[in-house]
Amino acid sequence: MTAHMPDPVTLEDDVVRLEPLTLAHVPDLFLASGGDEEVWRWLSSPAPRSEEELEGIAEKLIDDPEHVPFAVILKETGRAVGWTTYIDTPGYADSIEIGWTWYGRAVWRSAVNTACKILLIDHAFDKLGVNRVQLKTDILNTRSQAAIQRIGGLHEGVLRRQRRRSDGTWRDTTYFSILDDEWPAHRARLLAR
């Protein structure tokens, strides 16, 4: 279990700024993804059809003590293009999960995801003192699995019928992790790209 969930912080590099998610981010976030079924396809909530729906989803996430959500701000524009969170990991000592992540299509296949993960993983190991970062995704979400493996996530296994998808079907969840002593080599490889 995560010893205690971290306090909200702002993390940034040349590409993105991760800042604590607030409802003030909702208009930008809705512009980035509102109603886009493909962006929301693998998430636990259906694609929001209005700013009010997205605000409701964001509010639940912000109020959940097991999540520390960040708005992903594209430095080039100053606009929120997605969100990502630290998540509590009951049953795993000195671990934290990165998840509930989505980005608007405009930044897919860009440096945004790699930049976010480097910031979050660096912070987890260097400042929070965890020894393991966990990531998971729907077994059918091959794009996300490839992204996790690209940053160094090692496949740990699959929990079958772990939870229901927003459409009511069962989701098998595939788990990955990165350990603190593995990260420096992965980080150097990612920065060299």
Image (cartoon, rainbow, N blue to C red):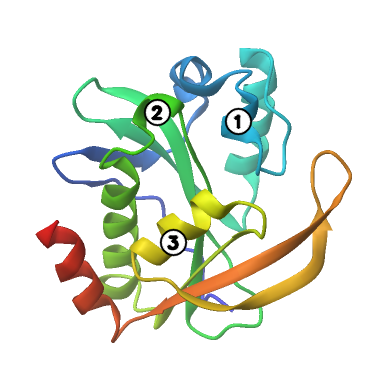
Quarter of the image with the C terminus in it: bottom left
Task: Say whether residue 163 is left or right of residue 71.
Answer: right
Q: Which residue is mark 3?
A: 148
Amino acid tagged 2: Val
Q: Residues within 10 Å of mark 1 (few under 14, many from 20)?
A: few
Q: Position of residue 46 (x, y in %)?
A: 73, 31
| Secondary-structure class at tag 1 | helix
Q: Is residue 176 visible?
A: yes
Residue closest to the eye, 152 or 134: 152
Quarter of the image with the N terminus in it: bottom right
16 lies above or below 130? above
Q: Which residue is mark 1?
A: 38
Q: Residues within 10 Å of mark 2 (few under 14, many from 20)?
A: many
Amino acid tagged 3: Ile
Q: Quadrant of residue 138?
A: bottom right
Tag 3 or tag 2, which sits nearer the N-term? 2
Q: Is residue 99 visible?
A: no
Q: Which residue is mark 2?
A: 81
130 lies above or below 49? below
